[in-house]
Every structure is written in structure tokens, then in C-alpha cells.
Amino acid sequence: MKVEKDDRLILLTNDDGLYAEGLNTLTQLMQEYGKVVVISTIESRSGMSQALTVKMPIRVKLLKETDTKRVYACSGTPTDGVKIAVNQLLERKPDWVVSGINHGANASVSVIYSGTMAAAIEGCLYGIDSVGFSLNDYSSKADFNASKKYVREIMNKLGNNKLPQGICLNVNIPSCTDSDIRGIRICRQARGNWREEFEKRKDPMGKTYYWLTGIFQNHEPDSTDTDEWALQNNYVSVVPVSIDMTAHSYIDDLRKQFNLYTLK
């Protein structure tokens, strides 16, 4: 059943913090679709993945409330924020969980590290239609103007077509002008990994510490059906992400190795 704007409740979050321009842009856009509730931390929680706060209390503060928008500051992770909102703060389960717009792409294997996508996945676990948006620009001053058209286009589709149970969307937008974006491509996640490197440094007290850096390695740069290829060629990539992490293609081989040909 189609939900009308006046009845739609939308939960927004991100992992870059409440005052990130990406979240500000997304909040403005989502107010076109319904009542918005925003929850995020003051500071960045990038790279937190699906982390939960379990050894200290989580603080939540209502910062702003109008007829169409509420804004909460949360001391926890993006996943904490979705859980607290759904279980404690909202009058009912939201119709959408929308996360982002992240400063920096979350294509390929980055999806498993991203706090932005973790929030979308958490919404998916609650049976809520959920989307994570990212822009391929890590700058705090990134220009999100070209993103607006494609966020609207994707949310319009979602308004008319519910996602299957257990699936959310990972959307990555190239960093270029609207006229240079070539359209939307439905993709799969590229196979690749981050080659981590740690810089060994000294603090002012002379003590050693390590700073994480890294280089992404795309293992299939010429595959035209991947999210990485789409971004590199100025397409918006849309990847359906499943919460089922079972390697289904390996189940039969594994049964043979254990001589278990039938399930009992």
C-alpha cells in the first residue's frame, strides 16, 4: 500500500555527525516526503560498521522539534541511534530509514566498514525500507547539489515499490556536476579490498602511536557491472544489499567435504 507524504515517518542518520553537510542536504530533501526524525552524534563515527555501545550508557538529547522535524543528538554509534529511535523515541516504526549522505564512497568492500551503511542495514533488520547514500568526495566542503536529483529519483521509486524483506540499497554518487552524471546503474559490489598501511609516529611526549592509512585495490577494474566501475565512469551506482551473509554457492561443496549429503 502506498504511504502518502502526510502519513510517512522517516528516520535519518549518518556517521559523519549532525552538522555534516551531507546530512543537512538529506534532511532538506526528505522533508519533501514526510515527517523527519534525525538522530546522529555530534562528532564523526566513520568506520564504526555495525558497532554497538555495550560498556557505557548512551545519552540522547532532543535539540529541535517542529511539526515536521525532530533532531536528536546521540552519544552512540549509527547502529545505536537506529535502535534507540525505533525502540524508544519514535511513536511508531518508521516507513523509511535513510542514512547519509556520506562524505566519501561506500562502494565495494567499504560497505562492511561503513557506519552509514550499518544504519541502513539495521533498519533493514527491523523490516523497514532502508537506503544508504554516499557521495564520492571525502571533503567536509563537498558539493551535494548534483546528488539531489538522484536522491529524489531513488526515493520516488521506493515510494512506489517496497523493498523485499532483508534487502536494503547502497547508493553511491560520483563527484561531478549534474551534467556530467550519466545516469543510474543497478550494480553488484565490486571484488576488492583495502591494503592497510600504518604510519608509525611520535606524539609530543615522544611516545609511539600508529595512524591508519590505506589504498583500495579493485580486483576487477574492467568489469562493467560493478559499483566501482559505475563511479569511475560517472554513473550513480545502486547495489541491493542483503543481510543474509551465507555463502550459498559453497553450501553443497561444504556438505560433500563433511559427507553430509542430506539435512536431518
Image: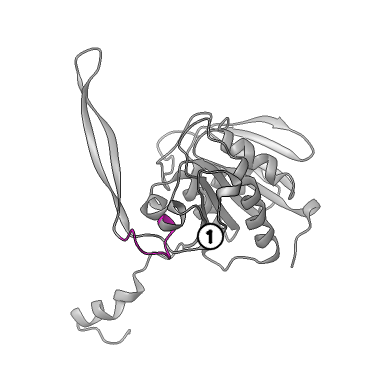
As drawn, which residue projects farthest toward the front? 179
> Disc 1 marks which amino acid?
Cys
Task: For label 1, count other residues whose C-alpha is less than 10 Å away and answer few (under 14), some (14-19) or many (20+).
Answer: many
Question: How many numbered markers are drawn?
Answer: 1
Residue 6 highlighted magenta (yes or no): no
Question: Can residue 154 be seen by looking at this rendering?
Answer: yes
- Looking at the image, residue 200 lies above or below residue 235: above
Give whichever of 80, 247 is nearer the camera.
247
**Span of residues in magenta:** 220-228
- The percent coordinates of residue 49 (x first, y second) are 41, 46
- The percent coordinates of residue 28 (x first, y second) are 69, 40
Determine whether, in the image, residue 238 is placed left or right of residue 146.
left
Give the residue at mark 1. Answer: 168
Check the picture and name the quadrant holding the C terminus: bottom left
Q: Please give the name of the residue rendered at 59% of the width and 65% of the height, measured from the top-left corner.
A: 163
Residue 225 highlighted magenta (yes or no): yes
- The percent coordinates of residue 185 (x first, y second) are 52, 62
Colour scheme shown? one colour
Determine whether, in the image, residue 95 is placed left or right of residue 101.
right
Question: Can residue 125 be seen by looking at this rendering?
Answer: no
As drawn, which residue projects farthest toward the top? 205
